[in-house]
Image (cartoon, helix red, strand yellow):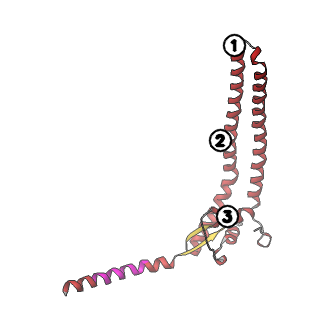
Amino acid sequence: MKPFLKMMLAAAIGLLAMKPAAAQFQAQKFAYVDTEYILKNIPEYTDAQEELNTLSQKWEKEVKALYEKVEAMYKDYQAEAVLLPQDLKKKREDEILKKEKEAKDLQMKYFGAEGELFKKRNELVQPIQEKIYNALQEIAETKNYAFIFDKAAGATMLYANPRLDISDEVLDEVGTVMQTVRKENRKN
């Protein structure tokens, strides 16, 4: 009988020890935001996106023109190849390969992982993202949120109570350091 009492006492102590942890878990607050909605309502972000799109289109045209030149050089080569001596064939092939490499290098320069578009996006968008993050952090600390989820980030959210959406609060907080769209004019 004594071992049974010891086991019951240990179980009771274990349950009591877990109760504060369970209460703490239940007391944690959470909210969510829609960063897509937030970004749509920051004119500076819209301007940055337009600038990035303009640059991207300009650079795409440049790269496309270079590839078209390579294609034209290749077609000319094919048409004349039967008439060219071996040394001239080799020279033309080398010129085509050189131009093709130039086109690929330009494409990487603009659109590569460390390319101009990536750098420009960091220059224009990162400061905005940092301001949003700082606003989220301020709200989370002020209102004691343990978690803030992003509805737009592709996280599967089967249901979201609109009362827990703090996107407008984030826009208001960001509005203290940069221009945002007025609450009544915000886009969904």
**Residues at marks 1 and 3, CA–CA distance in whole angstroms:** 61 Å
Image quadrant of residue 89?
top right
Q: Is residue 139 left or right of residue 61?
A: left
Mark 1 vs 3, N-terminal side: 3
Residue type at tag 2: Gly
Q: Residues within 10 Å of mark 1 (few under 14, many from 20)?
A: few
Image depth: mark 1 or mark 3 in front: 1
Magenta span of residues: 9-21
Residue 139 screen position, x and y as percent: 61, 71
Residue type at tag 3: Thr
| Residue position for label 3 | 35
**Residues at marks 2 and 1, CA–CA distance in whole angstroms:** 37 Å
**Residues at marks 2 and 3, CA–CA distance in whole angstroms:** 26 Å
- Tell me, yes or no, whether the highlighted magenta stretch contains residue 14: yes
| Nearest the eye: 42 or 152 | 152
Q: Is residue 10 left or right of residue 18?
A: left
Residue 50 screen position, x and y as percent: 78, 52
Residue 85 screen position, x and y as percent: 72, 12
Residue at x-position 68% and y-position 72%: 169
Image quadrant of residue 71?
top right
Residue at x-position 70% and y-position 71%: 168
Question: Tag 2's secondary structure?
Answer: loop
